[in-house]
Image: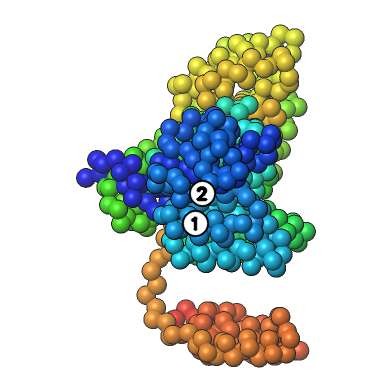
């Protein structure tokens, strides 16, 4: 029986005092105009937080109209969350003070820790030690802060607050957070949570995913990643979250120059990008490579076409067991029905392109090919129906060129016919403003047809002032709209790739009936240590085969043949070896 409120469960989560605090103290709150302490405190006051707010500043009696306190010990109320905006050398003492007064959560916005060198690392280590002694968990240091719109919390020094929504953003870059928030305001995208992790000396992605996966305010999760500290915890949280909610990952530092810049920025070790991609390949998430692609994904996640994972459940109804873990939630989700009309098991991402210009149609088709998106192949019935509603000079193919002067009714009929075709999974609709074009009228027709189809429609009204009213209609109707056709195709590609990855997530390798010998770990270690002792970082071919053999991994060995007869002998030896592998016998190498 899952008829319980998840809110009661989340109150017992170890991060509940961070995301749903009853009282907040701010060390370094200030009245000095445009200082970090002034902006953070002003943002909190203007966000509408209805709990206790306590500015800590020994030099002031009041700050921005609020009573100020010399130290946290002077506060009569119990403080759930402390925000620290003072210089790095002062923070160990503040952490000690918070621990002695029962504070369990901190946000350290200040910089000057490991990213600043040896002395900064010593300060960071001291803060971490004190926090562990008192059981304090903290965000940062060197972060933008935290936003929870529905809780009335804006603890950042940015100029923008977030509108309430169901999209969570977790970013290692505060600058990326502020850019996305500014973009979101213009595009009517709301957030449940915005977290700037900073250098993640304590809490990291795995912790945040653990909370967000069961947060009823959050339907989708965006991650901006420069480096991972705890890979095991990250992957565990990521796979569990992706089974329940869509997760989009923008991972930077793909090349040496970017990795070096990331190291100086957050102090995070970026690691091999190939390794990261391999780890993500079957985790059910979508990886994007540019901020533009992340924006396209965010539009889809906040639209009426929000994708639902293959294993999905209502996060608002779950047994309120305080000990429930992510794997247990995932286990529950796997037995419940899929609520989305776009079922990953049947959705194949075949795209129809409808346009009133041949050139944009060709460009959209090229972009689809670049992204590996299949164009829909229409049935004979679909072509016959299109012939009835389109001029005789239409393109007679996909892209569907409805001709430049197309009225709203022609767009309406063409989209309706294409989406009814079983071989079509969605459409990108493009409009260019021409003398006879009615951008707003066509937009109204698209909104109407979208209300009668579950298949996604992504729009691109190309141009400026002439098409702005049409874009406004799409925003109000929660239909994704992009200024460029390339972004529109990317947005559709996000939906297609998401469902493809969800299929991979559901695929479970068959259980092997073979009995494997235990690995020869010591033998492998000896080979590696021998190579390292010789200052080598690359194994020889025989050493590499020996390592594979030590872990019972089947491998094909290469041989050198200097004559036809030697080639026959090599082939015979390899055939015998293949037969051993097929029988599950792994002879020592």
**Vertical side of 466 occupied by 189: above or below:** below
Question: Which sits earlier in the primary sequence, circle 2 or circle 1?
Answer: 2
Q: Which mark is residue 276?
A: none
Where is residue 260 shown, x and y percent of the image?
75, 61
Q: Residue furthest top?
A: 436
Instruction: Report crowding for label 2: few under 14, some 14 to 19, many 20 or more residues within 10 A (C-alpha).
Output: some
Question: Closer to the camera, 386 or 276?
Answer: 276
Q: Which mark is residue 71?
A: 2
Q: Residue furthest right?
A: 257
Residue at (72% x, 27% y) in the render: 360
- Taking the image as shown, residue 241 lies to the left or right of residue 188, namely left
Residue at (50% x, 60% y) in the render: 96
The quadrant the N terminus occupies is top left
The quadrant the C terminus occupies is bottom right
Question: Closer to the camera, 181 or 328?
Answer: 181
Where is residue 205 shown, x and y percent of the image?
53, 55
């Amino acid at each position: 029986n899952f008829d319980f409120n998840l809110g009661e469960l989340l109150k017992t989560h170890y991060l509940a005092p961070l995301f749903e605090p009853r009282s907040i103290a701010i060390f370094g709150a200030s009245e000095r105009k445009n200082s970090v302490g002034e902006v953070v405190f002003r943002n909190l006051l203007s966000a509408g937080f209805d709990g206790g707010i306590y500015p800590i500043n020994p030099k002031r009696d009041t700050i921005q109209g609020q009573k100020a306190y010399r130290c946290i010990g002077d506060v009569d109320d119990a403080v759930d969350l402390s925000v620290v905006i003072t210089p790095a050398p002062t923070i160990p003492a503040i952490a000690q003070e918070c621990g002695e007064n029962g504070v369990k959560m901190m946000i350290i916005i200040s910089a000057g820790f490991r990213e600043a060198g040896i002395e900064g690392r010593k300060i960071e280590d001291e803060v971490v030690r004190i926090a562990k002694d008192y059981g304090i968990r903290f965000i940062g240091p060197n972060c933008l802060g935290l936003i929870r719109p529905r809780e009335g919390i804006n603890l950042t020094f940015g100029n923008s607050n977030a509108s309430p929504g169901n999209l969570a953003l977790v970013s290692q870059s505060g600058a990326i957070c502020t850019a996305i928030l500014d973009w979101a305001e213009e595009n009517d995208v709301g957030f449940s949570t915005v977290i700037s992790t900073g250098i993640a000396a304590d809490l990291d992605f795995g912790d945040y995913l653990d909370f967000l996966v069961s947060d009823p305010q959050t339907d989708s999760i965006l991650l901006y990643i420069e480096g991972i500290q705890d890979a095991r915890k990250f992957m565990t949280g990521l796979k569990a979250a992706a089974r329940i909610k869509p997760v989009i990952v923008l991972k930077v530092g793909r090349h040496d120059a970017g990795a070096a810049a990331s190291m100086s920025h957050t102090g995070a070790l970026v690691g091999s990008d190939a390794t990261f991609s391999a780890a993500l390949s079957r985790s059910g998430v979508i990886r994007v490579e540019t901020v533009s692609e992340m924006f396209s994904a965010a539009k889809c996640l906040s639209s009426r076409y929000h994708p639902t994972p293959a294993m999905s459940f209502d996060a608002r109804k779950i047994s309120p067991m305080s000990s429930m873990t992510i794997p247990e939630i995932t286990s529950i989700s796997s037995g419940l029905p899929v609520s989305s009309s776009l079922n990953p098991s049947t959705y194949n991402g075949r795209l129809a392109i409808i346009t009133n210009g041949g050139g944009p149609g060709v460009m959209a088709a090229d972009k689809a090919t670049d992204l590996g998106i299949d164009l829909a192949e229409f049935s004979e019935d679909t072509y016959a129906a299109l012939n009835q509603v389109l001029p005789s000079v239409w393109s007679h193919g996909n892209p569907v060129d409805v001709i430049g002067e197309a009225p709203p009714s022609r767009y309406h009929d063409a989209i309706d016919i294409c989406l009814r075709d079983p071989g079509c999974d969605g459409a990108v609709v493009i409009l260019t403003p021409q003398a006879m074009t009615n951008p707003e009228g066509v937009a109204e027709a698209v909104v109407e047809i979208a209300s009668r189809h579950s298949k996604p429609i992504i729009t691109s009204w190309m141009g400026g002032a002439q098409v702005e009213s049409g874009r406004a209609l799409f925003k109000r109707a929660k239909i994704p709209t992009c200024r460029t056709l390339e972004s529109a195709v990317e947005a559709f590609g996000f939906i297609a790739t998401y469902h493809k990855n969800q299929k991979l997530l559901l695929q479970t390798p068959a259980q092997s009936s073979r009995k494997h010998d235990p690995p020869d770990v010591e033998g492998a270690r000896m080979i590696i240590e021998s190579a390292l002792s010789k200052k080598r970082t690359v194994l020889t071919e025989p050493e590499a085969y020996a390592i594979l053999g030590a872990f019972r991994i089947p491998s094909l060995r290469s041989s050198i043949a200097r004559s036809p007869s030697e080639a026959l002998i090599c082939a015979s030896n390899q055939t015998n070896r293949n037969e051993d592998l097929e029988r599950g016998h792994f002879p020592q190498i």
